[in-house]
Image (cartoon, rainbow, N blue to C red):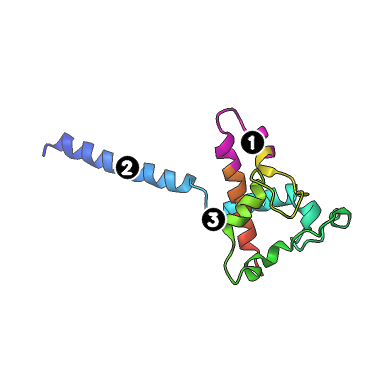
């Protein structure tokens, strides 16, 4: 291998390491996602579910059904965090069950309306996942 080929190979290897390192640094870290979910929670949920997610927000007394204590989701489901169920409840665009009307906002539709053109479902899924990751992090 010529001297210039060795230099090119070394430069290519260094560039690859730098690019991979930058990509890993730019990837959301779990703590960042929890923080983003906490912001979403405080902006959208705390008014009903309470600042500590115990179902005691300032509007909770005005609702027909008391909001769920979101810190007890895992315990209420036999020690397993009910990811899919929570996703569907937050999204809210599916069918309302036999229990009647839904008092909780349909966040999937709200967030889709806020999304930049072409990013609707991706934006909604991201918001829902941030919220779920936060809720999973606060389980009692």
Q: Which of marks 2 and 3 is in front?
A: 3
Query: Magenta span: helix, strand or loop, mainly?
Result: helix
Q: Give the residue number, with chain letter if any, for mark 2.
A: 16
Q: What is the CA distance from the residue labelled 2 to the residue labelled 3?
A: 25 Å
Q: Residue furthest front?
A: 98
Magenta-tinted stretch: 110-124
The residue where tag 1 is placed is 112
Q: Which mark is residue 30?
A: 3
The image shows residue 12, relative to residue 98, as above or below, that is above
Please say whether residue 43 is one of the residues in the magenta stretch.
Answer: no
Q: In which quarter of the image is residue 84?
A: bottom right
Residue at disc 1, secondary structure: helix
- Give the Cα separation between the discs numbered 2 and 1: 37 Å
Residue 83, image quadrant: bottom right
Residue occupying image coordinates x 40% and y 47%: 21
Q: Residue at x 64, y 71 (%)?
A: 75
Mark 2 or 1, which is nearer the eye?
A: 1
Residue 55 figure quarter: bottom right
Relative to 77, does residue 118 appear above or below in the rendering? above
Label 3's element? Answer: helix
Of the residues under marks 3 and 1, which one precedes in the sequence? 3
Crowdedness of circle 1 by 10 Å Cα count: few (<14), some, many (20+)? Answer: some
Q: Nearer the viewer, residue 102 or 134?
A: 102
Q: Distance between the residues labelled 3 and 1?
A: 24 Å
Q: Which x, y percent locates residue 33?
A: 58, 52
x and y percentages locating residue 73 in the rendered image: 66, 65
Task: Evaluate if marks 2 and 3 touch, with contact meaning CB atoms under 8 Å apart.
Answer: no
Q: Is residue 50 above or below residue 23?
A: below
Ranked by sequence position, the earlier of labels 2 and 3 is 2
Q: Which residue is drawn at the image coordinates 57% and 44% (left, top)?
A: 125
Choose the circle earlier in sequence order: 2 or 1.
2
**In the rendered structure, does residue 113 fall within the stretch colored magenta?**
yes
């Amino acid at each position: 291998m010529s001297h210039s080929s060795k230099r090119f190979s070394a430069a290519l290897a260094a560039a690859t390491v730098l690019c991979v390192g930058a990509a890993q640094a730019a990837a959301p870290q779990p703590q960042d996602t929890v923080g983003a979910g906490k912001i979403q929670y405080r902006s959208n949920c705390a008014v009903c579910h309470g600042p500590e997610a115990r179902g005691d927000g300032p509007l909770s007394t005005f609702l027909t059904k008391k909001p769920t204590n979101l810190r007890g989701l895992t315990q209420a489901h036999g020690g397993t965090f009910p990811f899919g169920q929570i996703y569907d409840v937050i999204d809210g665009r599916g069918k309302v069950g036999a229990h009647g009307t839904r008092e909780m906002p349909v966040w999937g539709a709200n967030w889709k309306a806020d999304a930049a053109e072409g990013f609707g479902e991706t934006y909604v899924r991201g918001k829902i996942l941030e919220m779920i990751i936060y809720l999973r992090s606060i389980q009692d």
